[in-house]
Image (spheres, rainbow, N blue to C red):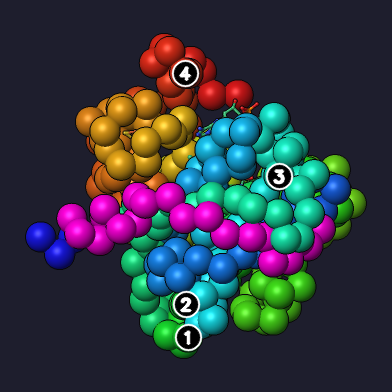
Amino acid sequence: MKLSAYRIAANKLRTTRILCIKTESPTVKTLTFKDKVCAKAKPGQFLMLWIPKVDEIPLSIMDVNESGEVSVAVKRVGEATTMLHKMKEGEVIGVRGPFGNNFTLTDGKVLIVGGGTGLAPLWLLAKKLADKKAKIFFVIGAETKNELLFRERIEKICGKENLIATTEDGSYGVKGLATTPLKPLLAKENFSIIYTCGPEKMMRKVFDLAEEHKIPLEASLERLMRCAMGLCGSCVVGRYRVCRDGPVFNSNKLRQIKGEFGVSKRDFNGKRIPLE
Ligand SMILES: Cc1cc2nc3c(=O)[nH]c(=O)nc-3n(C[C@H](O)[C@H](O)[C@H](O)COP(=O)(O)OP(=O)(O)OC[C@H]3O[C@@H](n4cnc5c(N)ncnc54)[C@H](O)[C@@H]3O)c2cc1C
Ligand code: FES
């Protein structure tokens, strides 16, 4: 009863104004706005952001604070995200959420692996893990140095010695993918859990390595979302709906969707298409 009242409240569209816009990289901007419902979100949850006259899109909750402020990091990829990048402080947006489940918090030794805007939910996760005094190792990846997100603030949380940055073109840190430094790292350190978010093929590699080393994993998945309430079925993967049963999937659930995880997704017509 309590849960459904919460779900109804979360699903109600609230309008708010953009308070602050920060350019994080040539393609990513962070938008901050007030929304007291989403400000109570747990790491891993997402919201639906409505851009008036354009669209409503799912975005991970990247940060929250006690003053009721919420931040999202938006990569410019198409119509809605381009419009968001053009918006100014003070303009009106709509918010529904928070939706979905969340990462599990621990005080152990943890590894976080993130690529691109997958680092958004991982930033809130890292902050909450640091509050619990977890020992955090972080691997962040991007194509180029300019696109490496949140490097300085992540370094402050986990320490320079526990942060490995990778770039595909070698312009910063280790040349290669976020998965490149994992084999030696997993051979050296004993982690109680691995968390990952980013391109799904990257997450599949992290999952395979975690299985090999028998380490529990939590991965945050993306699928097309419309209702975000488990009703429309557009986010289906295996027998799960990512908006309701995810977006965070643990090793057990990932084993059940191995045929699709890192392999395929569904388009707007429900047709299964290979992941790029
Ligand atoms: C749970 C979740 C969390 C996300 N978190 C972030 C985030 O923190 N930052 C970020 O930049 N992006 C995030 N995304 C992806 C973001 O929703 C898409 O980039 C956005 O919807 C693209 O809209 P567009 O109109 O700009 O692009 P379009 O040209 O419409 O689409 C470009 C691509 O974006 C994806 N996409 C489009 N519409 C949707 C939709 N309704 N649901 C899911 N994917 C869609 C598709 O893969 C599509 O091919 C997240 C997606 C999900 C499902
Ligand atoms: S987005 Fe509608 S069921 Fe998940």
CB within 8 Å, label 1 to label 2: yes
User: What's the CA distance linking mark 3 and mark 1?
Assistant: 32 Å
**Residue 63 occupies quadrant:** bottom right
Camera-near label (3 vs 4) is: 3
Q: Residue at x 71, y 74 (%)?
A: 153
Amino acid type at image mark 4:
Phe
**Residue behind mark 3:** 84
Label 4 residue SS:
loop
Amino acid type at image mark 2:
Lys
Q: Residue at x 44, y 42 (%)?
A: 221
Q: Determine whether the beta carbon of the residue marked 3 sits less than 8 angstroms from the nearest atom of ligand 1.
A: yes
Mark 3 or mark 1, earlier in chain: 3
Stretch of the chain drawn in magenta: 4-23
**Residue behind mark 2:** 128
Q: Is residue 226 left or right of residue 27?
A: left
Label 1 residue SS:
helix
Whether residue 112 can be seen here? no
**Residue behind mark 1:** 131
Mark 3 or mark 2, earlier in chain: 3
User: What's the CA distance linking mark 3 and mark 4?
Assistant: 22 Å
**Residue behind mark 4:** 268
Q: Quadrant of ligand 1?
A: top right
**Residue 53 occupies quadrant:** top right
